[in-house]
Amino acid sequence: MGDLLVAAEVFLLSLLPSFEGRYAILYGVALGLEPLTSLALATAGVATLSLALPYLLPYIDSLMEALSRSSYKSVSRVAAAYLRYVGGVRSRVSRYVSRWGYLGLAIFVAIPLPGTGVWTGSIAAYVLGMERRKSLLALIAGGLASNIITFIPAYVASAAG
C-alpha cells in the first residue's frame, strides 16, 4: 500500500506547476519507489499536462480575468498574481521561441530549473499564439527530456546506494 500511495503522489506532483515530472521523479526515488516506475509516472504526468494545458489555458485566462475584478480581495490577488505570472512567462520565453521556434520551446521546457517546464511552456505557447499541435509535440519532447535529465542522476544514485 505504501508504494501505491507514493506512486499516486509522484503522478499528482508531476502535475504541479514548477514541480512537474522532474522533481516528482526525485521525490519517488527518495521515498524508495523504483526509479523506472518514478520515471514512468512522471512522464504520464508530463504527457497529461502537455495534452491538456494548451486546450485549457484560454478558459483559465478568461476565468482569471474575471476573478481579478472580484470584490473578494484574496481572490482578486490570486488571479492578479496568475496574470502577472503569465506576463512574466511571455518575457522569459519569447527570446527562445522567437529565435528557435518550436525547438526553442522544447529546449526551454527541457531545462530542469524552476520557472521552466510544461506549465510555463504551455503558457508561453498560448500567449505567443503558437500552433497548438506543434506546441503539443514540443511540450511532450521537452518534458520527456527534462524527466530524463533528472532521471539519470537519480537512477545512478539509487543504484549506488
Image: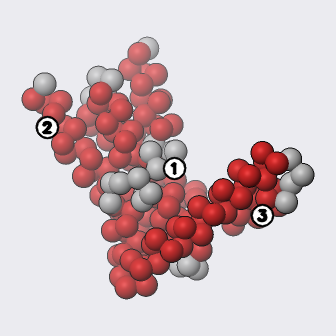
Q: Horizontal and vertical percent for residue 142?
A: 36, 62
| Position of residue 67 in the picture relative to residue 7 (left or right) | right
Question: Quadrant of residue 69 in the image?
Answer: bottom right
State the mark number for residue 65. Answer: 3
State the mark number for residue 42. Answer: none
Q: Secondary structure at mark 2?
A: helix
Location of mark 2 (residue)? 156
Question: Counting residues from the N terminus, which is met first, the one under dot 3 or under dot 1?
Answer: 1
Residue plotted at (25% across, 44% down): 151
Q: Secondary structure at mark 1?
A: loop
Location of mark 1 (residue)? 17
Question: Counting residues from the N terminus, which is met first, the one under dot 2 or under dot 1?
Answer: 1
Q: CA distance from mark 3 to mark 2?
A: 45 Å
Nearest the viewer among 137 and 6 is 6
Question: Counting residues from the N terminus, which is met first, the one under dot 3 or under dot 2?
Answer: 3
Crowdedness near tag 1: few (<14), some (14–19) or many (≥20) residues, C-alpha within 10 Å = some
For badge 2, the amino acid type reads Val
Query: Taking 49 as reference, is 24 above or below it?
Result: above
For badge 3, the amino acid type reads Glu
Residue plotted at (33% across, 23% down): 31
Q: Horizontal and vertical percent for residue 65?
A: 77, 63
Question: Quadrant of residue 34 in the image?
Answer: top left
The N terminus: image quadrant: top left
